[in-house]
Image: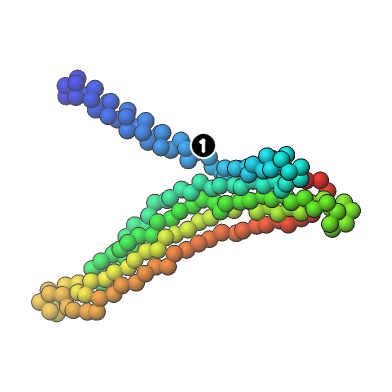
Amino acid sequence: MKSTTRATLAAVITGVTAAVGAAATPAAAAPGPIPVPVPLDGVSQSTGLEMPKAYLELPLLTPGVPEGPRYVTGRLLPDHTLPRVPITGMLPGAHLRVPLPHALGDGFDHVGIDLPASSLRTLGPGLNLDAPLTPPNPANFGLPSLKMPQASVIAPVLQTVADADLGAGPGL
């Protein structure tokens, strides 16, 4: 192998390694939700009223590896002809505190709700198909027989556990 070929091959491998490393870095840098404050301070200062304090948590969704086809005896086409794609991430969260001076009695100056970001796991819909032919049949001189075609849709899956906290207390 010539030295120019080796240098070119080394440069290509280095470029691919750098691209894969750069693509993996953002997902590793932000493992949880990203907090985003809702700016209401300007309204509070201009009106002279105490405004609610709020911020949201935005998730970072990451697609996974699709399920591969599974071959089943007696069928010409594999199971999961169109594979389901898993996506993991988090549901967005929200935190809100609204001032209510003594509406609920002494010592209660705000009502707040906390909806923390919760984990989310989904599987997209999939598709199963089967051809209108059977595998080769030795009783039929090795020719396939006819049968009814089959098609089915695999329903999507959504798994999460949502959590919320509603409370009242002093201060904002």
Left or right for 24, reference 142:
right
Which amino acid is tagged 1? Answer: Ala
Give how far across and how far down residue 147 sits, in percent: 22, 79
Residue at the front extreme of this rendering: 47
Give how far across and how far down residue 127 sits, in percent: 34, 66
Residue at the top extreme of this rendering: 3
Assign the N terminus to one quadrant of the image. Answer: top left
Left or right for 59, reference 48:
left
Question: Closest to the observer: 56 or 149?
Answer: 56
Answer above or below: position of 7 versus 37: above
Q: How is the image coloured?
A: rainbow
Residue at the right extreme of this rendering: 106
Residue 8 in sight in this render: yes
* Dot 1 alpha-carbon crowd within 10 angstroms: few under 14, some 14 to 19, many 20 or more: few
Question: Closest to the observer: 111 or 88?
Answer: 111
Give how far across and how far down residue 130 sits, in percent: 26, 71
Residue name at image x 54 percent, y 48 percent: 59
Residue name at image x 48 percent, y 40 percent: 27
Q: Indicate the secondary structure of the residue bearing disc 1.
A: helix
Give how far across and how far down residue 154 sits, in percent: 39, 68
Answer above or below: position of 63 versus 6: below
Q: Quadrant of residue 126?
A: bottom left
Answer above or below: position of 147 versus 76: below
What residue is disc 1 on? 29
